[in-house]
Amino acid sequence: MAFLGGRESAEAQTNAVKPIVVKENLAENLAEKFANVSPKLTSNDGNPLLDFMFTADPTAVEYNGRIYVYGTNDHQQYEHVGKDGKNSYEHIRTLVMISTDDMVNWTYHGLIDTAKLAPWSQNSWAPSITSRLEADGKTHFYLYYSNGGGGSAVLTSTSPVGPWSDPLGKNIVDRSVPGVDVDAPFDPGVVIDDQGTGWLTFGGGTPKTKYMPDNARIVKLGADMISLASNVAKIPAPYFFEASDLNFINGTWVYTYNTSWEQRTEWPYTNIDKPTQCSMSYMTSKTPLNPDSWKYRDNYFKNTGDVNVGPLTNNHTHLFKFKGKYYIAYHAMYLQDYFSTKGGFRNVGIEEIQVDEENVNIPMGKATFKGPSQLNPLNPFVLQQAETTAGTSGQVQFEAVGNVGNMVAKGKTDKQCLMVRGADFSKQIPAKFEARVKGKGTIDVYVNDLKGTPVVSLICDGKEWTTLSKKIKHKIDKGVGNIYFVFNGEGFLFDEWKFIY
């Protein structure tokens, strides 16, 4: 991340700010202009997590009070084939990184370029991540991903946003490994148990039978997390299709997977309902390398198309705990209408779910547009990144600048909007606003909605990064509200901001 410290003071930059004339009808035009650009900007919806690009197949890891979510970059495929093309995944060679501390304002950290990091690989889909504190005093992150359908690869880092490296130069599992007798050893799911041992699940491909496809696999990882330390074992998952994932809850391994589109013609369980087509189910075991130990438990997440959150699609979830609550991350086709496409492009959403840890029961979850509630208010008086948003005016663009994981918003000749939710002005009323910017452009700041006059406006006209500051002339009421940043200017860059009292 970039920081304001060490640069010219905000006061010294005040003279660089030019006055701006605000037209009386600007707010009304803005509300109309942004009305249909996103399901989030002018609503209280929290899903999808990002509304300016397509993402899918989520995984998550907690670090320093934040949850970091990683996903398949469906947007790369969209950019290759266009709105009239299909999401057939072959152009995807990057993974998306985002994070939050409150579950509604998400910081976009950019992309992991697997084509550059692992040029021997073919694609990068469906990541799964874990971390642990190691002897060097650093937290090490291990990110496994599908190298197309041919295998699963792994990247490592000592930061949740990189830089990432390829420690093996090959797949960690593929058909060259004994026991990996499946067509598609992809969609990895990783967990570290209470003894510090890593485990990896994966699988997919042509089913041997409809009811018991025999394509799900699990293996123990070596102490280095990048080698295998056991034989590859089978998981007898009914109507298994893909999307393996793994959790460890109360001494129990919890395996989740996506069921197939096949009709449920066979079902031996009299006290458990058949899983619906292309839904998510889970199994549990105390001895995961013993296939007979796995017990089918239930279906816990239906296809998003079955609950009217976009059309029917494939399914991929990740269960995680953050700040004492359980959540399910998944994907749905939230944004297709907003991007004028029917090509099958997906977006990550999240729902809170109540997990019974004692009995290791996962209740039925449900995809929504609303998403989870905000865990804590956003502090507008500390430095915030422009790439942290709860909603945008749709196809906003960002680019990497400075430190790894830092992005900046790019202006256009047409106005764009960034919004953050739940900013806390209940204790202090700000006197000034400052932002780090570059290029020729403007920022109008609104609080609570896009109506009325901006509380403050900045104009920048400089070739170098500068911090601009201006007094707020329009009162901000005490309370918790949303902040909207309306900006434009071809080539204009917006990095970070804060209010000052």
Image: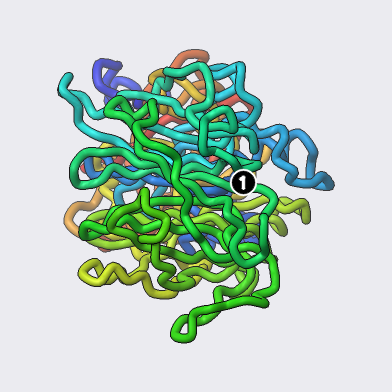
Q: Is residue 229 above or below residue 257?
A: above
Q: What element carries label 1?
A: loop
- Which image quadrant: the C terminus? top left
From the viewer's perspective, tell me whether residue 126 is left or right of residue 498.
right
Residue 459: percent from the left, percent from the top? 49, 31
- Regarding residue 24, the answer to whether it shows in the image is no
| Residue farthest toward the bottom in the current orientation of the protein | 270
Please state, as top left, top right, bottom left or bottom right, where the N terminus lies in the image.
top left
What x and y, as percent, mark residue 469? 34, 31
Residue 79 in sight from this viewpoint: yes
Identify the residue at image location x=47%, y=21%: 401
Residue ID at (59%, 74%): 276
Q: Mark 1: which amino acid?
A: Phe
376 to 159, vertically: above or below: below
Which percent across, then down, holds residue 282? 44, 64
Above/below status of 427 relative to 306: above
Colour basis: rainbow
Instruction: Say which of 347 and 29 sits in front.
Output: 347
Q: Which residue, as the protein is rendered here, is positioned at the far right?
A: 84
Residue at 54 percent across and 27 percent down: it is 399
Give the camera-side residue of 224 and 350.
224
Q: Nearer the viewer, residue 354 or 259?
A: 259
Q: Does 314 sit left or right of 470 as displayed?
A: right
At 65% from the left edge and 42% from the top edge, which residue is drawn? 183
Neighbour tally class for label 1: few under 14, some 14-19, many 20 plus, Cα within 10 Å: many
Q: Name the residue under label 1.
A: 54
Residue 220 rendering spot, x and y as whole percentages: 35, 39
Side of 357 relative to 496 (left or right)? left
